[in-house]
Amino acid sequence: MARYYLVILIFNTLFALFFYFKVKNTGLSSKAFIFMALFSILIGAFFPLLVGFFNLYVVIGINLFAVGIGVLLAAQFEVAPAVERIDVEEHILGPIEEEEPVATEEPAAPAESEAAVREREVPEQEEIVDEEIEEETEEEYGIEVEEVEEETEEPLGQVDQLSALVDDRPLSDDESDRQGENIMSVKRLHVDGNLDLLDSYIQRGFDAKAEGKLDLGIKYFASALELNPPFDLETMMSFDVVAMLKETGQYQKAREFLEEFETEKSTDLSPSIAREIMTNLKYLEILQGMLLKANTPNLPFSMVPALIRVSVEEKVNQWKNEAF
């Protein structure tokens, strides 16, 4: 029996050392290891008396089981880590309590200062916005307004010139021919003025497009289209307007613009251009539907994911194979 208790003591010592070095990083204190050792010794001491079984391997297994149970129980009843955490929290909260008077005095001052700063910034922001709007109107839209005014003034000037050339008195054949030539020359000058204005609008539209000012480019091209340019030029500008509307995420306006162009120029369209317009309309329809499903209806065309583009192109190609 003495040998048995000696073996229990040795094994418990070895187990205690082993678990101490393996489990000491878990936050358990020395009290926990003492508790486990006592628990193991208690079970090892009373087990042979209760069962009357002196097998060494059974004793080792019982000790291992006892130490494991002890670890679990020690973890449940361990109090030392909690006490350490409370000390750390007190150490952290200590300086905050000392700074509380300073913190209580600060809110009123920042609130007033922020309000005052906002009151001072609002007029400044309004002045900045006004200056930016004035600069934009002077640089970008001012010239356009002047040209529109010139355009509105030109027909009046033309009427005055024509009325000056027309005489109520009876004219001879030679005088009638000369008057007709003068009238045609005035009309030719008016057409040349429209061409200059058309070229100006187109050039400014391309410049705005190159600078990334797509909304301004759309306005310039729309103004140029109102001057009844040649059909080829009108077609090119119409496709450019559609491309810029797509890039700004205005897919519905792009469809409406292209449908209106197709309706107005249906008799003048060649089969290839008509087919291209139909393909673009179908592309816009499918793309708009997929963007609506993705909850991004106004996403610019350059930011559309590649997966959506590939899906749209596949559906458009399938439609083209069936339609043409």
Image (cartoon, rainbow, N blue to C red):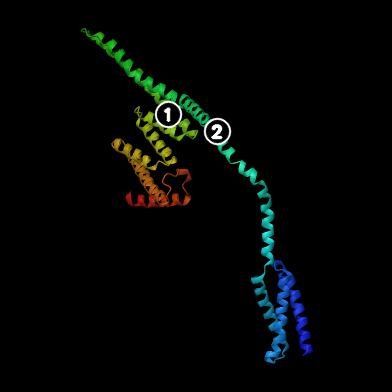
Sequence-wise, which precedes: disc 2 or disc 1? 2
Picture coordinates of residue 109, whole percent (x, y): 59, 37
Q: Residue at x 34, y 40 (%)?
A: 256
Image location (x, y in percent) of residue 55: 72, 90
Height in image: 235 above or below 53? Answer: above
> Measuring 72% from the left and 73% from the top, which residue is drawn there?
33
- Give the residue number, with chain letter if any, for mark 2: 116
State which quarter of the image contains the N terminus. Answer: bottom right
Residue 192 shown left or right of residue 168 in the figure: right
Image x and y of residue 60, in percent? 71, 84
Most extreme residue toward the bottom is 52
> In this view of the protein, which residue sits in the foreground, 187 or 302?
302
Whole-percent x, y for residue 311 in the image = 42, 52
Whether residue 196 can be seen here: no
In this rendered view, identify the residue nearer to me: 260 or 133: 133
The residue wearing badge 1 is 202
Q: Nearer the viewer, residue 136 or 101?
A: 101
Q: Amino acid at mark 1?
A: Ile
Element carrying mark 2: helix
Question: On the image, which quarter does residue 4 sit in?
Answer: bottom right
Quarter location, residue 5:
bottom right
